[in-house]
Amino acid sequence: MKQRLMTPGPTPVPEETLLELARPVTYHRSGPFRELLKQVTDDLQYLFRTENLVATLTASGTGGMEAALASTVPAGAKVICLVAGRWGERWRNLARALGLDVVSVAVPYGQAVPPRHLAEALRLHPDAKAVCATLCETATGVKNDIAAYGLLVAATPALLLVDSISGLGCVECRTDEWHIDLNVTGSQKALMLPPGLAFVSVSDKAWEVMDAAAGAPAFYFDLRRYRDALATGDSPFTPAVSLVRALKVSLARIRAEGIEAVWEKYARIAAAARAGVQAMNLELFAQAPAESLTVARVPEGIDGNVLLNRLEKQYGIKLAGGQDTLKGKIFRLAHMGHIDAFDVLTALSALELVLLEMGHDVEPGAGVAAFQRVLAESVAAPQAV
Ligand SMILES: *Cc1c(COP(=O)(O)O)cnc(C)c1O
């Protein structure tokens, strides 16, 4: 049976990238590797929409988050964490582990954190050194308004740290225009790579904070080491050379398509997926949905774990379920990276079949038809001009 990985990380890797990964390992203290690092750093700046340096770390996404926080905020200092789900909680738990004084601004699962809640927190805590936010809350499918947070934080001495791990490269994200000081992403979501690399962009405001500090409570994750090494085209530690070569392949694909075109493509697919899910008499979970995944509630009377198991065992479609308290209650369907409109259509049609089998009230083909209708409308529009 053909297997389709449709989880919001890891995501499928294109064949040309897999072939690159199969090539022999090369030495990193060399002219060709410095040239490669220069090229991918330039491509990452294009992807991040930034003039700032983007550091490439060998770590999963959380390593990038830890580097951003440990490098900029000294132990005991105050940070504001915006929490809309498990990944906002990751920032909060990370900050606590680093000995920071955490102000948590939380909303119920399924909602985005309103910018006015941040404005209020900044007013009450003018001594906050940083604000930690999440572009796409992958646990609930919500997108937060990073541009609005950026305007608020830029007016203060605090730094804005954003986890854009399940968004960047799929969902509109403008690092410089939105005043993001440290923007963190990972390789295994929209960038069509295996897990293993994290990327962190750093603003001048953030470098000033780091340079004024005595030192970070970190060695491997001290971002200054990455800046200093990059000045000579190097990486401070042994980089994941094969993954960096594969990264070049991914970034070339994105550049060839154009980042704005990628954002628009996923906005259309996401709108079609939401229409498809609703036409199957399912309720969307996210109030402000992200373009990188669709999250819906499992209907009353249906066991979400059984639903996902059947999708995988009978049709080879791997969706993600809910985590922690949402286990069995929601399912999460990714559309980012190397997942295209027809992969999503396939997943929706299999979902329809399993829901029918399990006794849910759905008209066969209803979800597929709604998906096609929305996609047809959005694709027809530009051609009509
Ligand atoms: C997937 C994801 C992460 C993952 O972190 P890892 O350390 O790579 O497991 C972090 N934040 C968000 C929003 C994610 O979607």
Image: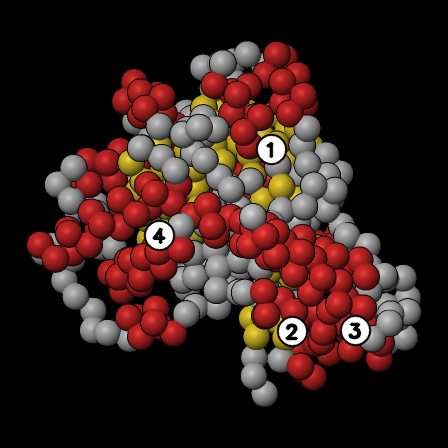
Above or below for 258 versus 373: above
Ligand 1 within 8 Å of disc 4? The answer is: no
Give the SS element for disc 2: helix
| Residue contact at pointers 4 and 2, CB within 8 angstroms | no
Give the SS element for disc 4: helix
Residue drawn 83% across and 75% down?
364
Q: CA distance from mark 2 to mark 1?
A: 31 Å
Q: Amino acid at mark 4?
A: Arg
Q: Amino acid at mark 3?
A: Gly
Q: Amino acid at mark 1?
A: Asp
> On residue 365, which mark appears?
3
Q: Which residue is mark 2?
A: 346
> On residue 145, which mark appears?
1
Mark 3, residues whose alpha carbon is within 10 Å: few (<14), some, or many (≥20)? Answer: some
Q: Earlier in the sequence, mark 4 or mark 2?
A: 4
Q: Nearer the viewer, mark 1 or mark 3?
A: 3
> In the rendered image, is residue 141 in sight?
yes
Residue drawn 67% across and 56% down?
377
Residue 149: x and y in percent read 56, 26
Considering depth in this image, is 71 or 152 the residue closer to the camera?
A: 152
Q: CA distance from mark 4 to mark 2?
A: 27 Å
Give the SS element for disc 1: loop
Residue 321: x and y in percent read 69, 62
Mark 2, residues whose alpha carbon is within 10 Å: few (<14), some, or many (≥20)? Answer: some
Q: Which residue is mark 4?
A: 255
